[in-house]
Image: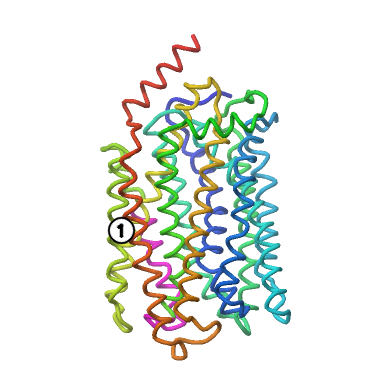
C-alpha cells in the first residue's frame, strides 16, 4: 500500500484511534496516580518515589529513538508498524498489572526497587507500542487538514481513556480493604483493558494505508542529525517539552489538591477528577472545526494561553466551593483539548521537512523523539512536584487534618504556580516554529518533483 492523499475511511480512523485508549490509560495511571500510590498506599517518601519515577526516563532517551529506527526499517507483511502494536499491547498490559502489585509488607527500599523494576518494564513496553503506533499518523496520509482530523479522532480516544482512568480509579481503589489492595485491582483491570484495546487497534488497522519500503541502513549519526536539523520539529519539541512539564506537574498534584486542599468527599473524587476529561472530550471536535479555519500554530498559541490561565483560580479556591470548582475544571478541560490537538497534529507535518532534505521518511525517528519528549516532560514535572512536596513538608500516608499548613501550600503551588510558569515559557518559545500550511504544501510539491 501507499500513503494516502485524500480522506481516510472512517473505519481506519476509528480503528487507529482505539489504540490511543491503551496509551491514554497508561499515561493517566502513571501520571495521575503513581506518585500518590507510592507515597500514600506504599508509604514511600516523596523524594524517593520521585527518583523512582524519573529514572526510567533516562532509559527512554535511548529506547524511544531506537524503537523509531527499528520500526522505520522493519520488513513485514503487516507493514513497518503494526507488528509492534501486537507485541507492545500485551507487554504493556502485563507490566501495568505488575506495577500496581507491589508487596506492601516489604521495606520502603524494597518497595521502591520493585516499583523501579516494573516501571522500567512498563516504560519499555509503552515505547514498543506507542512509537510505531503514533508514527502511523504521518504514514497513512500526507494531507494537512486530514492529519488534523485524524489527530482529532486520536485525541477523543485519548480523552475517553483519561476519563475512564480519572473516574473509575478512585472508585476501584476505594473498594479494597486498603489503598494497596485497591490499587492492585486497578492494575489488573486496566492491564487487561490495555491488552484488549491494543489488539483491537492492531486488528482494525489491517487495511490502513502504509509505506512498504523500509529506509536505508541504520546510522546513529543520521538519526540524530535527522532530528537536530529538522528546525520545525526541533522548535516544536522544545515547546512540547515545557507543555508536558506543566501537565506532569498538575496531573500529579490533582489528587493531592482535591483530597488535601479542597477536601473533596472521598466518594466524589472520581467525579471531580473526571470533569475536565469530560469537558475535553466534548470540546475536541469543536477544536478540530476551529483548527481547520486557522493555522495550526495560531490554534496552538490560543491553546497555550488558555492553559496558562486555567490554573490561576486554584491559587485561591477554598474547601466547600463546589460549583466554582466545577466551572474551573470545565475550563481546564477546554484548554486541555486544544493543547493536545494542535501540537500532535503539527508533528506529522515535520516528517516531510526531513524527507525533502534526506530523501528518506523517518516517521519512527521523529515520533520516537516526540514520545520521549512527552514522557520526559510529564515525569520530570512529577519529579519537580515530589521535590516541592518534600520541601514543603508533606507527611506521607496521612489525611488532610494531619498535614502541616506548609504542606498544603506546597500542594497548591505545585498544582497552579509551577504549571503557570511552564505554560508561559512554552507560549514564548512557540514563535520559533515556522511551518505554515503554505510552506508544508510547497515542501510536498518539491518532494513530488524530485521523485519524477
Quarter of the rendering containing residue 183: bottom right
Magenta includes 261? yes
In the image shown, does 59 or 106 lie closer to the viewer? Answer: 59
Quarter of the rendering containing residue 431: top left
Query: Label 1, on which residue?
Result: 308
**Residue at 44% across, 25% down:** 5
Q: Decide: few, some or many residues near mark 1? Use Cα within 10 Å; few <14, some 14-19, many ≥20.
A: many
Residue at disc 1, secondary structure: helix
Q: Which residue is the extreme one toward the bottom?
A: 401
Q: Is residue 317 left or right of residue 375?
A: left
Residue 161, image x, y percentages: 50, 58
Residue 6, image x, y percentages: 43, 26
Residue 152, image x, y percentages: 41, 45
**Residue at 70% across, 68% down:** 113
In the image shown, does 41 or 431 lie closer to the viewer? Answer: 431
Q: Main secondary structure of the magenta part?
A: helix
Q: Is residue 112 left or right of residue 396?
A: right
Quarter of the rendering containing residue 330: bottom left
Quarter occupied by the N terminus: top right
Residue 42, image x, y percentages: 63, 78
Q: Is residue 308 shown above or below 220?
A: below
Q: Is residue 139 shown above or below 261?
A: above
Q: How is the image coloured?
A: rainbow
Magenta includes 4? no
**Residue at 64% across, 44% down:** 85
Q: Which residue is the extreme one toward the front?
A: 391
Q: What residue span does the magenta drawing correspond to?
A: 260-283
Amino acid at each position: 500500500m501507499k500513503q494516502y492523499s485524500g480522506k481516510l475511511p472512517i473505519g481506519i480512523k476509528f480503528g487507529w484511534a482505539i489504540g490511543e485508549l491503551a496509551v491514554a490509560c497508561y499515561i493517566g495511571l502513571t501520571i495521575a496516580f503513581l506518585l500518590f500510590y507510592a507515597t500514600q498506599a506504599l508509604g514511600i517518601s516523596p523524594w524517593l518515589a520521585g527518583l523512582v519515577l524519573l529514572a526510567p526516563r533516562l532509559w527512554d532517551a535511548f529506547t524511544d529513538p531506537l524503537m523509531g529506527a527499528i520500526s522505520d526499517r522493519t520488513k513485514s507483511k503487516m507493514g513497518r508498524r503494526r507488528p509492534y502494536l501486537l507485541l507492545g499491547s500485551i507487554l504493556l498490559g502485563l507490566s501495568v498489572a505488575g506495577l500496581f502489585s507491589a508487596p506492601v509488607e516489604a521495606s520502603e527500599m524494597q518497595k521502591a526497587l520493585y516499583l523501579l523494576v516494573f516501571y522500567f518494564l512498563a516504560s519499555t513496553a509503552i515505547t514498543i507500542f506507542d512509537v510505531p503506533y503514533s508514527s502511523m499518523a504521518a504514514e497513512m496520509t500526507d494531507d494537512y487538514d486530514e492529519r488534523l482530523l485524524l489527530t482529532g479522532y486520536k485525541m477523543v480516544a485519548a480523552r475517553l481513556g483519561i476519563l475512564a482512568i480519572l473516574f473509575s480509579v478512585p472508585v476501584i481503589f476505594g473498594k479494597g480493604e486498603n489503598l494497596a489492595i485497591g490499587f492492585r485491582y486497578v492494575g489488573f483491570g486496566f492491564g487487561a483493558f490495555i491488552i484488549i484495546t491494543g489488539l483491537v487497534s492492531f486488528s482494525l488497522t489491517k487495511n490502513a494505508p502504509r509505506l512498504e519500503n523500509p529506509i536505508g541502513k541504520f546510522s546513529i549519526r543520521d538519526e540524530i542529525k535527522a532530528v537536530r536539523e529538522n528546525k520545525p520539529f526541533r522548535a516544536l519539541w522544545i515547546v512540547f517539552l515545557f507543555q508536558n512539564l506543566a501537565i506532569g506537574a498538575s496531573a500529579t498534584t490533582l489528587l493531592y489538591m482535591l483530597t488535601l486542599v479542597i477536601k473533596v468527599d472521598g466518594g466524589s473524587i472520581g467525579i471531580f477528577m473526571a470533569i475536565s476529561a469530560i469537558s475535553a472530550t466534548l470540546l475536541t471536535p469543536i477544536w478540530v472545526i476551529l483548527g481547520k479555519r486557522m493555522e495550526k500554530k495560531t490554534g496552538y498559541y490560543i491553546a497555550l494561553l488558555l492553559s496558562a490561565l486555567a490554573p490561576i483560580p486554584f491559587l485561591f479556591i477554598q474547601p466547600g466551593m463546589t460549583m466554582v470548582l466545577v466551572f474551573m475544571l470545565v475550563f481546564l478541560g477546554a484548554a486541555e483539548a486544544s493543547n493536545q490537538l494542535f501540537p500532535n497534529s503539527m508533528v506529522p507535518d515535520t516528517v516531510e521537512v526531513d524527507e525533502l532534505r534526506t530523501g528518506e521518511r523517518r516517521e519512527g525517528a521523529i515520533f520516537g523523539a516526540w514520545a520521549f519528549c512527552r514522557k520526559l516532560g510529564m515525569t520530570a514535572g512529577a519529579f519537580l512536584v515530589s521535590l516541592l512536596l518534600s520541601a514543603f513538608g508533606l507527611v506521607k500516608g496521612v489525611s488532610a487534618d494531619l498535614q502541616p499548613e506548609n504542606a498544603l501550600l506546597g500542594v497548591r503551588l505545585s498544582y497552579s504556580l509551577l504549571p503557570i510558569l511552564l505554560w508561559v515559557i512554552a507560549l514564548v518559545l512557540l514563535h520559533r516554529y515556522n511551518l505554515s500550511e503554505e510552506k508544508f504544501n510547497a515542501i510536498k510539491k518539491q518532494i513530488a518533483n524530485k521523485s519524477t
